[in-house]
Image: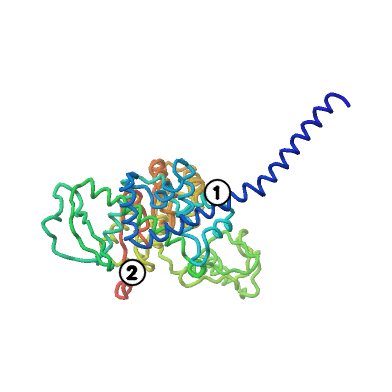
Amino acid sequence: MSAQTQIKTDIHQRLDAMHAARAIWEEGTLRAANEELYAILEGVYALYAELKAEVGKRRAFAALLTDLEIKAQANTSLALKVIRYVFAGQGRREEAYARVVAIAHDMKGPDQSFTSYVQECGGIEEVRRMPKSTKSTTMSKEDFKKLALEGLQEVQVGVSTFDLPTFIQPNTDYEEDYAVALVRCNDNGTGTIVYGCNEAGIIDAVLVSSGKDLDERAQESLAKLDAGDLATKRARDVREFASKMIRVGSGAQVSVSAVECAQTAQQLRPMGKSNGEWGSQFLPHSIYMHPKELIMSFDLKHLPRCFGDLVIADPLNASVICSYCELPPAKPLLLAGPPGAGKTEAARVIAHSYYEQRNIQHMHWEFNAASLGKDYEAKIMSEVNYQMFGNLDKALIVINEIDEMDLRTVQPKFREFMDAKRHLIRFVATTNHKSRIMGAVLSRFRVIDLDPPSNLDWVDR
């Protein structure tokens, strides 16, 4: 046997020995250690669940830590406090265990044990990696403050309305009419206001915290839309699209407008040909369809073609929309309001007036934010480049249902995109839910709130 072969055999034997030792350890000591660890964490979870459920036990636990001179920061979670007492000095492992306990408390079923849930998920490390709720890293404190101010402004009926006591008065040097109240939570489920504060820094901190909480709750609520809600929305979108579509025969190819087709048909009628006798040779080269199959829906036929065809309930709003149709938009325009208010048609008339005045060619006059996705920039810039070919003016982009952009991940980046491209693009947008748009984006638009027109508003039309 050569020296090289002997070395290779020796290495192989040593590796086999270590492999066998690992298998024995894994099935013996490690398995036993894991079982013991799960038993400890099961006890930690049980205590954590009790503390979460009863304020009296939480107070007793806090008092115990004080008696033992165990100090914790104000923002240290309850799970981490329990874990640190049990796993003293374990460093990052403590944070991992505390996260697993907290996630299990929020996610597992009421009849499932902690150990069963963790094993079902694939182990402690897999549970630790779970995102509890994705928090924005791109929104500033000022953004969250604006979220709170705009969201709370919509609250018409509060929890309670009362005469302000002397210790809760507005701060005349602060720009918002808010004060902070300290509420004692009573054992019977009621609350008592015991003190108040109007310091600007404290109010700001509470507003920022409220904005983060409202944002997180709103996103979680939206994320829980079930398949029925999604199906309803898609059905509505399909109805709206189908009502605007020209129904043509299968295999028909159209590259001219329905109006041009109708005009062509009228010109050919005196030639004595009935509908059934017409052939494609009598039609423009770009049309291959039987005239009997050319049917235009009523609402498409009567779409508003200029500002005078629009029906806007409020004369002041109408004058603003008219100015955007006649002059270059000075500021991005946001048309807000419920369905039926005329937002999309007003945006379409503004866009087509702009294109016609400047002889701008376009591929898409409108993008729907729900289908733009995270690669919105590439899609929009493709249209911008097309519009600006041979055009010295800016492009105009309409974004329908802009509130469909994700509030935490897409809207902050879209705000930066608007700022970076304002020398190239004029924006017009619509929304049914203004409250779902972050304040920093709203501030870049001129916002018009439209109401659906009444029956009397339609008389002149």
Is 375 positioned to the left or the right of 398 in the image?
right
Q: Secondary structure at mark 2?
A: loop
Q: CA distance from mark 1 to mark 2?
A: 54 Å
Residue at 48 percent across and 66 percent down: it is 110
* Circle 1/circle 2 CB separation < 8 Å: no
User: The N terminus lies in which quarter of the figure?
Assistant: top right
- Which quadrant is home to the C terminus? bottom left
Please indicate, yes or no, whether residue 366 appears anywhere in the rendered image.
no
Query: Residue 159 in the image: x percent, y percent?
Result: 25, 66
Residue behind mark 1: 125
Q: What amino acid type is highlighted by mark number 2? A: Pro
In the figure, residue 177 lies in which quadrant? bottom left
Is residue 274 toward the left or the right of residue 203 in the image?
right
Task: In this rendered view, identify the residue nearer to me: 212 or 380.
Answer: 212
Residue 435: image x %, image y %? Answer: 34, 59
Which residue lies under the disc numbered 2? 452
- Asked if one can make out residue 312 in the rendered structure from this viewpoint, the answer is yes
* Residue 123, image x, y percentages: 57, 52
